[in-house]
């Protein structure tokens, strides 16, 4: 008998609600994260949707607040670009209008400064001697961090890095 997988212990609705209130109070959560957590507790779909409605009414769960917190956190702490942030929000099943609103919270000048910081940091670490290859690697790196291609090229041209 394989004892490595124990059956999911089903929680009652009251206990699940108390746990979810703590879960949502700790940090902002998307509705999808909360839904997955509730299903992991073994709750039925009708109970899950009912609890999500209760959490929204009690203001524990707010999709707009989550989208803005996620966007600003990923931008300011991890220095992600708009494209990567948008993909992350789509994975969390946040609506397009909320994604647009959250991305609008990023200041354009701060965004360009962050991109320049990312490019300068990567350039300092680069050991590539060929200027063309070095430039291509910097562009590719910034794109992989979620920055827009045209903005990356503009920043490289105006910065004098390469």
Image: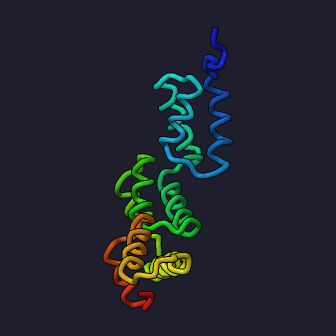
The foreground one among 83 and 132 is 132
In the rendering, at what x and y percent does residue 116 appear? 48, 81
Q: Quadrant of the N terminus?
A: top right
Q: Report the residue at 51% width, 26% height from top.
A: 47
The percent position of residue 74, horizontal first and vertical second, equals 53, 63
Residue at image x 44%, y 54%? Answer: 88
Residue at (65% x, 27% y) in the render: 14
Query: Does residue 147 lie above or below 155 as drawn?
Result: above
Going 59% across and 26% down the picture, which residue do you hit?
41
Q: Quadrant of the C terminus?
A: bottom left
Question: In the displayed structure, would residue 1 be above or below residue 145?
Answer: above
What residue occupies the far top of the structure in this picture?
A: 1
Residue 124 in the figure: left or right of residue 103: right
Specify how the rendered protein is coloured: rainbow
Q: Quadrant of residue 124?
A: bottom right
Label total for image: 0
x and y, in percent, of residue 100 in the image: 37, 63
- Residue 23 or 61: which is nearer the viewer? 23
Foreground pick, 130 / 112: 130
x%, y% of residue 23? 65, 42
């Amino acid at each position: 008998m394989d004892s490595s997988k124990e059956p999911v212990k089903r929680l009652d609705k009251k206990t699940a609600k108390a746990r979810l209130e703590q879960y949502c109070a700790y940090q902002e959560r998307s509705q999808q994260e909360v839904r997955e957590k509730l299903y992991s507790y073994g709750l039925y779909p009708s109970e899950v949707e009912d609890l999500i409605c209760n959490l929204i009414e009690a203001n524990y769960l707010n999709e707009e607040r989550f989208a803005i917190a996620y966007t600003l956190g990923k931008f300011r702490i991890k220095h992600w670009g708009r494209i990567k942030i948008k993909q992350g929000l789509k994975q969390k099943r946040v609506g397009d209008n909320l994604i647009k609103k959250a991305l609008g919270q990023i200041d354009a000048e701060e965004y360009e400064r962050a991109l320049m910081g990312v490019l300068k940091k990567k350039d300092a670490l680069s050991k590539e001697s060929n200027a063309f290859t070095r430039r291509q690697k910097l562009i590719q790196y910034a794109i992989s961090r979620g920055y827009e291609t045209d903005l990356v090229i503009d920043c490289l041209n105006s910065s004098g890095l390469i």
